[in-house]
Amino acid sequence: MTPFAVLSIAFFAAPSILLSMGDSSIGTSGCDERPEAGKNGWQTLFDGRTTEGWRGYHRDTIPDGWFADDGVFRREGKGGDLMTVEQFADFELHLEWRLEPGGNSGVILRVSEEGDKSWHSGPEMQILDDEAHQPDLKPKNASGALYDLVPVPEGAGSVIDEWNTVRIMVDGSRYRFWLNGVQTVDLDLESPEGQRLIAASKFARYPGFGREARGHIVLQDHGAKVEFRHILIREL
């Protein structure tokens, strides 16, 4: 850990919404292990050297401020969201991220380009320096949350200015997130509970939110320096 690393652990009273679909208990279960491209159906989305396979939201080119070098996608200047060229339906996604102190970003899923913003259609796994946003931070906006919908459970957290591991599973309308081996989200967006949460959120004004059966994966530009590496996917 660097001298400036900040341990950002969310000790919120509100639990994550976990629906009774298979084993939905919160746990570690080795979910922070790094998969290997070419094995068990995993393929890489980032070759570590080039921006091949990526473009900007609503554009055909790479946004300004995004760079690929030394195995890392890095966002340093304002330019817009970075998005996969390919679209995916049901999948498991693995990646690692590192965020500067005070920063904000996210991974947005099954994105359509019909909206003005990527988050108008795609559910987001939040990336945030939780500690820097206290005391006003809501649990449903903390790092690892299904943004503005599902709060993170007690004990989930990220290390700022260090590498954090993400696992995401999207299967039908069911979304499951893990952050550093701890499950933070298990929600079926089409369930009564999922529909209730959407109706009570800012996404209620966007009728296409969470409705795409297939879409792009977006790395969000939220103004902060953020890095991503080891981005792999396998389709379910």
Image: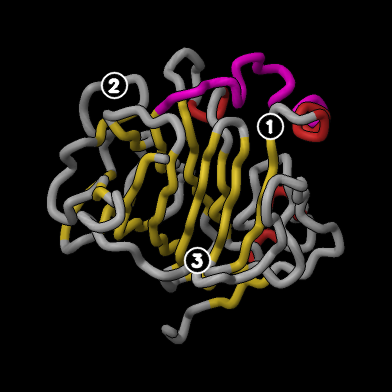
Q: Is residue 7 above or below residue 230?
A: below
Q: Is residue 207 above or below residue 151?
A: above
Along the line of sight, which residue is nearer the eye, 20 or 36? 20
Marks 3/2: CA–CA distance: 34 Å
Q: Which residue is mark 1?
A: 189
Q: Position of residue 223 (x, y in %)?
A: 45, 46
Which quadrant of the structure image shows residue 165?
bottom left
Q: Is residue 134 magenta?
A: no
Majority secondary structure in the magenta region: loop
The magenta stretch spans which residues?
Answer: 198-215
Question: Callout 1: helix, strand or loop?
Answer: loop
Q: Say whether residue 157 is left or right of residue 3.
A: right
Q: Residues within 10 Å of mark 1 (few under 14, many from 20)?
A: many
Q: Is residue 206 magenta?
A: yes
Q: Which residue is mark 3?
A: 31
State which mark lies toward you, 3 or 2.
Answer: 3
Mark 2 / mark 1, whichever is N-terminal = 2
Q: Is residue 143 above or below residue 172?
A: below
